[in-house]
Image: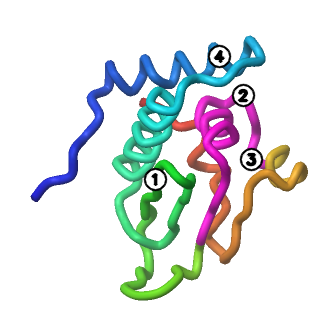
Amino acid sequence: MAKARIETAAGAAAVAAVTAATANGDRADRTTTATAVRFLLQTLADGEPGATVEVRVPPFGAVQFREGLSHTRGTPPNVVETDAATFVALATGTLTWDDARAQGIVSASGSRADLRGYLPIRW
């Protein structure tokens, strides 16, 4: 069975709503945030197929992307993990990878877990 995909219009609207709420010092509702995160994760994986790096944004989703060696069981060797607000900020370019790492709001382990070349995400 194929995975459900988020249409570009719905995903872009959710990302815009989360970004606007954050700019106003608010939080978007959980459903909108989940849609935005899942859309951005989907777009990230579409842009660079593979399974070398796993990006986790609990509790909303995770994807594997980037060509190279892949894993089949257990924790992958290259993992990036962060919260939803940080991921949306990284994905939209309102926060840089280096700043997020310096602030300790993103965890990255493994030699290929550097997302500088993949952020912001273009859709």
Q: Label 4 vs label 2: CA separation?
A: 13 Å
Q: Label 1 vs label 4: CA separation?
A: 21 Å
Near-viewer residue (33 or 118): 33
Near-viewer residue (29 or 14): 29
Which residue lies at the image location 39% right of the left edge and 52% below the top edge? Answer: 45
Which residue lies at the image location 66% right of the left edge and 76% below the top edge? Answer: 110
Question: Which one is earlier in the sequence, the residue at label 4 or at label 2?
Answer: 4
Which residue lies at the image location 56% right of the left edge and 52% below the top edge? Answer: 57
Cβ–Cβ below 8 Å for labels 2 and 1?
Answer: no
Q: Which residue is mark 2?
A: 94
10 Å neighbourhood of mark 3: few (<14), some, or many (≥20)? many
Q: Which residue is mark 4?
A: 21
Q: Amino acid at mark 3?
A: Trp
Q: Which residue is mark 1?
A: 61
Residue 113's place in the image compared with 36, above or below, is: below
Question: Which one is earlier in the sequence, the residue at label 2 or at label 1?
Answer: 1
Question: Which one is earlier in the sequence, the residue at label 3 or at label 4?
Answer: 4
Near-viewer residue (14 or 94): 14
10 Å neighbourhood of mark 1: few (<14), some, or many (≥20)? some
Quarter-of-image position of residue 2: bottom left
Question: Which one is earlier in the sequence, the residue at label 3 or at label 1?
Answer: 1
Residue 16's place in the image compared with 46, above or below, is: above
Quadrant housing the C terminus: top left
Q: Which residue is mark 3?
A: 97
